[in-house]
Amino acid sequence: MEFGVGKAFRDVDALLAETDRATSPLLPVLFFERGQDWVEKLRGLREQIAARDVLLQELQAGDATWETAALKPTGVWLRLWRLRSFYDR
């Protein structure tokens, strides 16, 4: 996902640079539509990042208790493992 975020930001920067060079009064309408598409894409990326942050917090909480309890790969750990493997795709 890290490369996807970087690419998305580069593409948005390119769009913003292109809007600065626009000279026709009709072009801002086209840029607005393209900008709205990017807003939706960036919202999706933000949601993915937030979900990964929740997963990371759960893993850190589990890590803190790992040393003090004999944890078996039960439902919570299996769910975390599945989520991690999903987000790594």
Image (cartoon, rainbow, N blue to C red):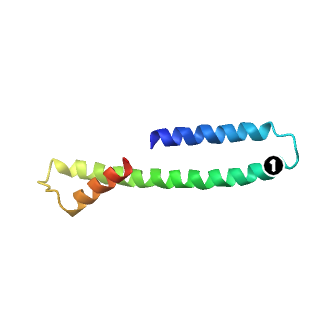
Instruction: Classify the position of the N terminus by image quarter.
Output: top left
Q: Position of residue 44 (x, y in %)?
A: 53, 55
What's the residue type where badge 1 is placed?
Pro
Outermost residue on the bottom side: it is: 75
Q: Residue at x 88, y 47 (%)?
A: 25
Q: Quadrant of residue 17?
A: top right
Task: Tell me which residue sits at (23%, 58%) in the image.
Answer: 78
Residue shown at 24% from the left, 52% from the top = 62
- The mark tally for this picture is 1
Q: Tell which of 80 and 63 is nearer to you.
A: 80
Q: Nearer the viewer, residue 59 or 89?
A: 89
Q: Is residue 56 left or right of residue 71?
A: right
From the image, tell me which residue sits under label 1. Answer: 28
Numbered disc 1: secondary structure: helix
- Furthest toward the left, the residue is 70
- Observer-nearest of 8 and 64: 8
Which residue occupies the foreground of this view, 65 or 59?
Answer: 59
In percent of width and height, residue 12 lies at 64, 42
Q: Is residue 25 left or right of residue 76?
A: right
The percent position of residue 7, horizontal first and vertical second, equals 55, 39
Residue 27 x/y as whole percent: 82, 47
